[in-house]
Amino acid sequence: MARRGKGGVGVGDAAWRRGAARPRLLVVSAVAWALLLLAFHLWSCASPSAYFLSALCRKGGEVVRASDLMEPPSKPLHRCSIPVADDPDAVVIPKRTPNEIVKKLSYITVDKRDKDSPPLFGGRQTWKQREESFKVNATMKVHCGFMKNSGADMDAVDAEYIQKCKFVVASGIFDGYDIPHQPSNISLRSQKLFCFLMVVDEVSIDFIEQNVTVKVDSEGGKWVGIWRLVTLHRPPFDEPRRNGKVPKILTHRLFPQAWYSIWIDGKMELMVDPLLILERYLWRGKYTFAVAVHKHHRSIYEEGDAIKRRKRYARPLVDLQMKIYYHEGMEPWDAKKRTPSDIPEGAVLIREHTTIVDLFSCLWFNEVNLFTPRDQLSFGYVVHRLGDALKFFMFPNCEYNSLFILHRHTREHSSKVEWAKTIPEIVKNGLKESRGGLGLWTPYPADLSSVKLPAVKRTSQAG
């Protein structure tokens, strides 16, 4: 007969209960370990260490991220493998592409009206000059920023350094929104071949020096890891977003010796060797310009609608830009167009600096200078105006997302003009920019009052 302990419970009963509890404890422990391992796997595949934990994260030859694992299969792939060459050392650099369409391109650097007012970085382009700039000829002279004494000045030590830069990876940080992120998987050949140039303003150089280690070489050049910091003094625009367009779009003007350039936004960490990028996106298909398709939108009118809803720029000014484009013959994108999209993912731009590519960059910048700083709106318009003169590669969005790791800004940018709903509100509150977007305030040479923008059907919840 079992002995009774306190409370009348037999010792045998207690032992039996302890024995029965052990299997349950083991099951609970096993489940907890499984959940812990799953959590670690998801974390590792979503973090930079995924590239070093590839055995855990690879599926069918591509790196799988946590976000991909949790997406329904019906959605387009967020990331996919990039068919790059196996070895950067084996890549053969081809001869430069000949300039067959535009043979000579020069730039307007002085406007006659500058004698009455301080010069503007983008110049005082008239509507007539704008129209003439889209007529492609063998010899052309156009506005392309960098008007004389208009700002964006480089230190002499940096101007001297960039003279040797024929292969460039460029990025930019303005108004202290980011710190430089070191690229990974860069071959020794590419480290020697490429200049990694991080363009910053004075606010950003101060912020960077306070938050990361900046080394100064014997000539006075400043470095953060592989990145050479290039400081631009006297910002040409009031709006930091516009200042960021100078190195992004006018890379050929800022670094005139460059044969090839790869632009990545400042919040990105490049994960693919730049020589492999040039081989994949330019040389293999004999292109001179490459950019990714936007993940969500194809039409500039759909993108414009998304910009207004997400308060990325003043609604009436976005509408005005769209009305001008529609009036000038820019139709909404459809499958009959020669390009897979009118909207790019403009955070990565891959270029050989031929004259036609440089002309495109000039005309694209001029639209950004005249209208809103949302450059994705004007990209497709300039492509439309140049027609068959510019042949370029729009590559899959899932490859674009596999080129980099995206970091958060150190703080979010917000400008009051982005929230404005009416023209009187902009004027009354002094939100009108003084050195950019002036085409939005210059009388257009046609009546736009009867122009009705095409209906927009929202195709993405993310837009």
Image (tube, rainbow, N blue to C red):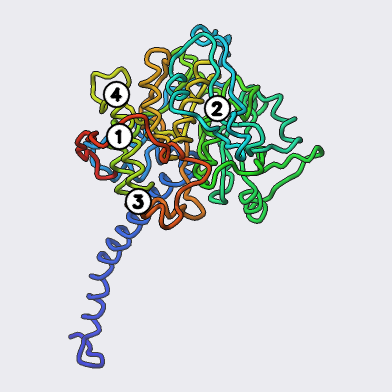
Residue 77, picture quadrant: top left
Quarter of the image where one finds residue 155: top right
Q: Are marks 2 and 1 in contact (CB under 8 Å)?
A: no
Query: At 63% from the left edge and 34% from the top edge, which residue is drawn?
Result: 115
Q: Is residue 303 left or right of residue 413?
A: left
**Residue in the foreground of this view, choosing between 450 and 103:** 450
Q: Is residue 69 left or right of residue 442?
A: left
Name the disc covering residue 144, or none. Answer: 2
Q: Could you tell me the amino acid type at mark 4? A: Gly
The reply to whether discs 1 and 4 touch (Cβ–Cβ < 8 Å) is: no
Q: Amino acid at mark 3?
A: Leu
- Distance between the alpha carbons at the discs numbered 1 and 4: 10 Å
Distance (Cα) linking label 3 and label 2? 53 Å
Q: Are marks 1 and 3 in contact (CB under 8 Å)?
A: no
Q: Secondary structure at mark 2?
A: loop
Residue located beneath label 1 in the image: 323
